Amino acid sequence: MSIRERLSGNEAIAYAMRQINPDVFAAFPITPSTEIPQYFAQYVADGRVNTEYVTVESEHSSMSTCVGAAAAGARAVTATSSCGLAFMYEMLYVAASARLPITLACVNRTLTGPININNDHSDSMGARDSGWIQIYAENNQEAYDNYLQAMRISETPDVRLPIMICQDGFITSHAVENILLEEDTAVKAFVGEYNPEHALIGRDHPLAVGPYDTCPYCMEHKVQQAEAMKNAKRAILDVAADFEKTFGRKYGFFEAYRMEDAQVALVLIGSTAGTAKACVEQLRAQGVKAGLIKLRVFRPFPMEEIAAALSHVKAVAVMDKSEGNSACGGPLFAEVRSACYDLERRPMLIDVVYGLAGRDCAVEDIEKVYRHLLNMVATGETGPRYIHMGQRSNQQEVL
Amino acid sequence: MDRQMVEIRWHGRGGQGAKTACLLLADAAFASGKYVQGFPEYGPERMGAPITAYNRISDAPCTIHSNIYEPDYVVVVDESLLSSVDVTAGLSPKGAIVVNSPRSAQALRPLLRGYAGGVYAIDARKISEEHLGGYFPNTPMLSAIVQVSRVLEPGRFIADMEASFRHKFATKPQVIQGNMNCLIQSMKEVRGA
């Protein structure tokens, strides 16, 4: 039986962590993820978990602690945001290349500078090539559910990659909303025990982790790692299927919302999807065939599946909540546009960069994007491919 | 309640408990079976900076995750914000604003940039100093907005809040009665114009 509750996104993650009772939590605070180690510290103090709670002096050290613990065979977790994630960079790559299934709760916050504490996706998007699986949430419920699925995906023997469970800073991390929680025993049974094939301690077979890799071998290891990311696609769907069977809530690579007959569609990530759904309903009531793809899994990127979902759409706006500084659009746009290249009939495709550093995005803002797409369809003109929305400016590229 | 969803915007200063009051209202609404959202919007991270917090309270799930621009009700926890923040921006003329002030609602109306809806005043400082021995305006403001908006049934709200305080203040039960007194007295004293 699910438990009806109301929790913030941060509380939901800490609650899931308590239920899972990981071996090691490496803790260093940074807004807006700070509440996660804070709530978890209370569980430790109250004796509700027997996790080794390691307070460190920086995020480089928290990820290093996770790397050490995971190499030793422990289930290791941490939480961070923004510059904290940036400070982990070196160790993110070490974790992924050493094939250590660490779980990181990433509460997305913009990267400095200028310094700002609010939400966008620039922190985790910057780590998109680090070899971590990345799964994003629309709300507290999805943050919780994604976290419950994280370790099984990450620890799958032919995957063995670290995983980032992302949610939008403040917008969901600090928003109290209704949520369905699962019983402790059901969660423990679903997540299961972690019994790695190889570990530094407690095993008969000696092992080295992270030694220098010479040229004749290093590329092989990198390709194996890339293959593991491909394998993660199957693992993500397998775990989602079992999650649906166990708890009744359905997940995939993305949620296709009213896409069956959509003529215009958005592709976006995170909490804005909820706002966009309200807009889709309003437009549908006016007879506009609007649809939405809310991407859940960004790494591995579901290229063929996204292309298939967009194959019948006339015009698509990819909405990037991070600025790629590429002079040609954000990271989500690059992936989606690339995915559509193999389609026989490609939709018109533009990038709308929005919501940087916490700039709010309301239903009316989303409607502007749909109206822009409808205009593209009506005129047959794609117009500028790479535009920004929501900033104060007189420039023409502003939607 | 003719509207399916009620939207409330809170204006306060960092440290006064506007966010806490917003979350307590979400708690109470949740306890009465509603779908709720309670969330803060932070400016600079320091005591005294203006902060905004929001509630959506509905009989159906709400997926919108933006700030609230056209609230049904506004709560002003710090009267000094009236001169620096456009607190009635977008406020529904069918709704109301509740201000923490020793002044009368009639005296406040001219400060509200022509707002034509309901204006209510409550002296949260007096009430909290009387019952809690210090300036904790959020509890009186919380019950004042429930009384004015009727977003929750007042009797049920009081009962739910008592249960909530018993849980929240389990380690210092001596403050429970004072907080309950604040809630009840504020409901009696809030006055409109």
Image: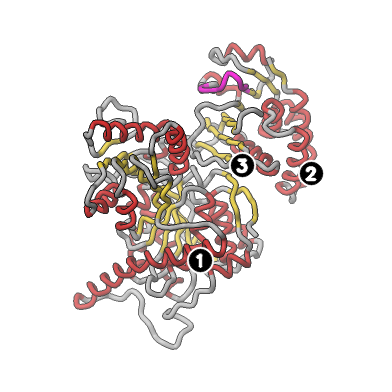
Q: Callout 2 environment at 10 Å: few (<14), some (14 to 19), or many (20+)?
A: few
Magenta span contains residue B93: yes
Q: Residue at x 23, y 36 (%)?
A: A382
Residue A383 is at least partly visible in this image: no
Q: Mark 1: which amino acid?
A: Asp
Circles 3 and 2: CB distance less than 8 Å? no
Quarter of the picture holding the N terminus of chain A: bottom right
Query: Where is A28 relative to B104, above or below?
Result: below
Q: Which dot marks residue A179? A: none
Tell me the magenta residue range: B89-97
User: Mark 1 highlights which residue?
Assistant: A242
Q: Secondary structure at mark 3?
A: strand
Q: Secondary structure at mark 1?
A: helix
Answer with the quarter of the image where residue B106 lies. Answer: top right
Relative to A202, residue A123 above or below: above
The percent position of residue B93, horizontal first and vertical second, equals 58, 18
Residue that carries the numbered disc 2 in the rendered image:
B174
Q: CA distance from mark 1 to mark 2?
A: 48 Å
Between B146 and A210, the residue placed more toward the observer is: B146
**What percent of the width, then of the height, locates residue B39?**
55, 39
Secondary structure, magenta segment, majority class = loop
Of tags 1 and 2, the one toward the viewer is 1
Q: Which residue is mark 3?
A: B35
Vertical arrangement, residue A370 with respect to residue A31, above or below:
above
Residue at the bottom extreme, as displayed? A204
B154 left or right of A22 in image: right
**Subunit ID for the residue under disc 1:** A
Residue drawn at x 55%, y 12% as measured from the top left: B114
Residue A104 in the image: state x and y as whole percent: 45, 60
Query: Type of residue at label 3?
Result: Tyr
